[in-house]
Image (cartoon, grey):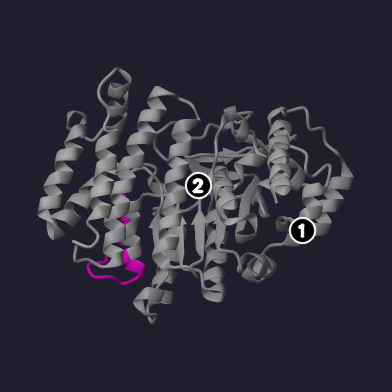
Amino acid sequence: MKFKLLLKALLSVLVAIVVIGCKFGDTADKGDDLVSYLSSKATGLSTSADLDELIAVAGDRRLVLLGEASHGTHEYYAWRDSISRRLIGEKGFSFIAVEGDWASLYELNRYVKNMDGAAGSAREVLGNLTRWPLWMWGNEEVEGLIEWLREYNMDRNFEDKVGFYGMDVYDEWNSKAALYAFLEKHDRNLLRQVKDLYGCFAPYGEDSWEYARAVGRGSVDCTDETAAVVKLIEGSRYDLNVSDYEFLYAKQNAYVVKYAEKFYRKSVIRRGPESWNSRVQHMHLTVNRLFNHYGDNAKGIVWAHNTHVGDARATEMANRGQVNIGQLSREELGAGNVFITGFGTYTGTVKAGRQWGDRMLKLNVPEAHRDSYEYLLNQVPYNNYILIFDEQDRAHDEFAEPRGHRAIGVVYNPEREVPGNYVFSILPQRYDAFIFFEETRALNPL
């Protein structure tokens, strides 16, 4: 056993070293042999029935991670929707956790479960979102999934209803307000204690970046205070006369504030992998709390960017000391209990902003760089298709060669795409499956 663990660790290091050393121009076009190999493995994708093999393989895993190569592409949202519906309807998955805000998106959870005080429609909730980028969750594609989930849950017992949650670290001030509202209703003495602790943030209003800059200039940080609030909330479980769902909601809001404080502080002070990793750790632990909440037999779905779900050990991220949900999940649950699906495109359009907080634009996605995976995959004779990876793929010399893999965020400038929007990766080690589209289009904001 020790030998196997050591061998596994050495292989991970070798993968990282190989990936790290790559630059554009190092991956010469290998020609027809690799394209022919990939063509023999590809399954064309046009209807939900074409997902049968993927659902069969992924459906028995405890956690299914569904990626995206951007936060503004219709096809990624639409096909994650199709996969999720089948995993829920056919394989009994318990929840979806997305790269979004806990407090705001919890209103969608109330809606799909028809809880007391729930909104009248998915559009009502999505239309009330306030944090940029609004299009990331406030779009017609998400609206369709939420309405389907509500209908699916309608005749099910409450404990069997499928949930929808945000797992990200942002929107901390909304989480703080939500925690105050919860304690105002259930324990005003505890509310006073929490407000006293969060008073540490008072000089900064609701500006987390200003807080982080002040700490960087030598002001006292609020790390101990946010941890103390979490401890207070967790220690009050048996004093609060609330359901498990209500307690999970309150506790998670306290965790959001705790990890947001760390994320912003690390972002300003150290500018290394610590800020990224603190956010990833929060998302990963949120999924773990959902598993604990739903029980030993629970199965979960995660929607997040490829950079979060595709195992970081098979990318250049490893050289920067960055981890992600895909890596942490495989390490903790075992690779056999996790199924990771990445998404990508050769060209198309996308919704994004040119800088943080900028207005939403419909931007062109240029044809993929010739040394990228997307360029290679576009030579396979299908417009849209699925690849499901096996050990043969992971041992294939040419396919297991690091290449650039496109990653577009909410901030995107196509004219400066190379090399900044490519992450060198070993695709069949990063994912268990990959869904490729020759041309994609921007999603449909509300």
Q: Is residue 116 magenta?
A: yes
Residue type at tag 2: Gly
Q: Is residue 357 magenta?
A: no
Q: Which mark is residue 42?
A: 1
Could you say where residue 90 lies in the image, as x and y percent from the top left? 56, 75
Query: Which structural element holds mark 1?
Result: loop
- Residue under the image location 36 percent in, 32 percent down: 264
Q: Is residue 189 above or below residue 17?
A: below
Question: In the figure, residue 250 lies in which quadrant?
Answer: bottom left
Badge 2 density bin: few <14, some 14–19, many ≥20, Cα 10 Å: many
Q: Are marks 2 and 1 in contact (CB under 8 Å)?
A: no
Residue 175 visible within the image: no
Residue 347 visible within the image: yes
- Residue under the image location 78 percent in, 54 percent down: 391
Could you say where residue 362 lies in the image, as x and y percent from the top left? 49, 42
Residue at the spot of label 2: 72
Residue stretch rendered in magenta on the structure: 110-130
